[in-house]
Image: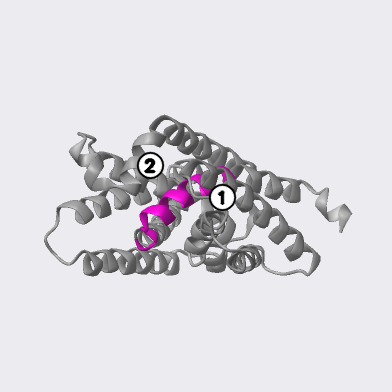
Amino acid sequence: MFETLQLPFMQRAFLIGAIAAIPFGLIGTFVVVRRIGYLAGAIAHCAFGGIGIGLYGQYLLAGCAGTTAAMLFPPMGVSVLVAVFCAMLIGLIQTQTKEREDTIIGVIWAAGMALGLLLLELTPGNINIANYLFGNILLITKTDVLLVSSLSIIVLCFVLVFFKRLEAVCFDEEFSRLRGIPTMFYFQLLLILTALTVVLLVRIVGIVLVIAMLTLPAATACRFAKRLFPICVLAVLFGWIVTWLGLFISVYFNLSSGPTIVLVAAAGYLVSLSRRKH
């Protein structure tokens, strides 16, 4: 057990778990408070479509222009672009369209997932779809660590700079609009930050379980605090704890890491329900 924990891939897994807990807790808090979990779910499934585009693009370029050109389509990089685009599209639908937004967002949700599955099916080679659907933190590479670290810094900086505005938009959007705050801009910003965080989660718990991991630590934190900043801090702490604890358990019992982490997070939330809310 302890010998396994000293292996490089295990050290990367624990490192990325600690780094990713920061945006998970911060953005997860805003998602829970603003009650936009269904929008985050749509963004997550669109991100899966981006992964399919990246892998299929690599296949096409590898056949035409060699391996170097294929690196122009890194799956996670394409996933970031697609997720951000879909976040902006969903935000526009949420604020501008006169159609039933739940229906349109449902279409985007299903189309993103279907596109990803179709392109992965068309891509030759041994591609383990389960790693994208359910995650595998043990397969994190040095490149993934750099990507997650970069995206985490971006999310953290934006949250710190715009924290008060995001807080106002989440708690009382109408009052914020009356005070002259451009609520649509900050709502779009929140969705874009959610998109970046979702891409981080894909490598850890996968597309299917991303909403659970994005919301459970924040929902647990809400049981212990009332103000937004303490909730954010507690959500980051809980996210860090459940990721590491789930990783320990998955290694010890030889279980899949993604589902184990989510079950630990769910257990923590259930335990918190027994505590009277402040």
Q: Is residue 117 above or below residue 75?
A: below
What residue is rendered at 41% in x and 68% in y? 117
Residue 233: name its quadrant.
Answer: top right
Give the position of the N terminus as an image quadrant. bottom right
Query: How are the colours assigned in the image?
Result: one colour
Residue 46 at x, y percent in the picture: 36, 59
Q: Residue furthest left?
A: 98
Amino acid type, label 2: Glu
Is residue 50 visible to the viewer in this orientation of the structure?
yes
Is residue 75 visible to the viewer in this orientation of the structure?
no
Q: Is residue 28 magenta?
A: yes
> Closest to the observer: 19 or 112?
19
Image disc number at residue 167: 2
Residue 266 at x, y percent in the picture: 59, 67
Residue 9 at x, y percent in the picture: 73, 49
In the image, 256: left or right of 67?
A: right
Decide: few, some or many residues near mark 1? Use Cα within 10 Å; few <14, some 14-19, many ≥20.
many
Q: Quick check: marks 2 and 1 in contact, CB under 8 Å?
A: no
Residue under label 1: 235
In the image, 174: left or right of 49?
A: left
How many marks overall? 2
Magenta segment: 20-38
What residue is rendered at 34% in x and 47% in y? 170
Q: Secondary structure at mark 1?
A: helix
Residue 268: name its quadrant.
Answer: bottom right
Q: Main secondary structure of the magenta part?
A: helix
